[in-house]
Each structure stands twice: as C-alpha cells, then as structure tokens.
Amino acid sequence: EGTKKPHDSDALTPWLRISEQEPQEFRSYWKGLQEHVGRVKEQNRKVKEEAVAYYDLGDPKVVATFFKTGNGSHLSPQPAGSFSLRGEGKNVFRNVYPAGVYSHLISDKHAAVMGSPRMTAAANNLWVRAAGNKANRRYAVRHYPFGGLLHDNHRL
C-alpha cells in the first residue's frame, strides 16, 4: 500500500519532518514555514478588507445572521479542531476542520442548507469556500436559485 508525501498545508507535516531531518535543516524549514504563514495571513487580511461581504462562520454572531435548516445537529459554529469520523474502515478520522459550521460531524446522513444575509454583489466574481461530498453550492439572484438546467450546479 503506497503512501503519499505530506503537503506543507497538512498540520501534521512539521511533526513528520522533525523525525526526517537534521536539527539545522528542520530549523530552516520551520523558519520558512513561519514566513509563509505570515505572508498568507497578510494576504487574507487584505482580501477581507477589500471584500464586499466576508462571513466568518466560526463567529457565532455571523452565523446567527444566516438562514439555516437541516437535520444536522451542529448548525452552530464549531471550534477549530472539530472532526468527523468514518463509520467503518481502518482510517477512523475523515477530516479535521477549521472553525465553522458543519452538518456531518456525527453522521454523513445529516444534511444542512445555509443561506447568507441578502447582499448586493458589485463585482463579477463570487468566492465561496465550502467542502462536501456530493454537496452543492449555488447562488440566488433576487431569490431565484441559479442551478439546475439553466445554470451549473457547482457540485463539490
């Protein structure tokens, strides 16, 4: 059974690297990783400042402004480090997540629909960060959902 090389975006990669590298080599790697994180944080700060709307779904006050429905028991913000489990198999953990709202932490059978507060989009682009197995992400214009026959459904 092959294993794939861990990517630096994986939170556990530094711990794997520390056992594979000499101390000086690891210090250099760690310093580079810290510099990269600093650049990413600065870029994210700029993007948030320039965004028409930015929703941090780890913030309970923001989540309270959303329309939510579904049978998922976690339609409230969950802390960073929340995780989902597989029902069977060797790899028990499905994923570990950043702070946000998740419907499937207990079961894949749980589902949810969330809608943001109304907003006016002045630009031609809409960026959404979402995850899901066979989930959909779609936008609505004047309460008409774009998806299906006329518009791409954007299946994740």
Image: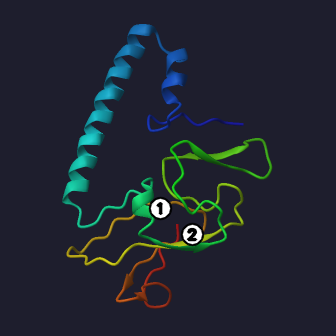
Crowding near pointer 1: few (<14 within 10 Å), some, many (20+)? few
Residue pictured at 68% horizontal, 66% vertical:
110
- Name, please, the residue furthest toward the top: 23
Label 2 residue SS = loop
Instruction: Please report contact status of discs 1 and 2: CB closer than 8 Å, yes or no.
Output: yes
Of the image marks 1 and 2, the number of the one nearer the N terminus: 1
Does 88 sit above or below residue 12? below
Task: Say the numbered circle drawn on residue 130.
Answer: 1
Q: What residue type is labelled 2?
A: Ala
Residue pictured at 48% horizontal, 14% vertical:
21
Label 1 residue SS = loop
- The residue under label 2 is 135
Tell me where residue 47 sits by quadrant: bottom left
Residue pictured at 24% horizontal, 75% vertical:
124
Residue pictured at 48% horizontal, 25% vertical:
14
Tell me where residue 34 sits by quadrant: top left
Q: Residue 47 or 112: which is nearer the viewer? A: 112
Q: Residue 156 or 109: which is nearer the viewer? A: 109
Does 114 sit above or below residue 91? below
Task: Say the numbered circle drawn on residue 145.
Answer: none
Q: Which amino acid does label 1 sit on?
A: Ala
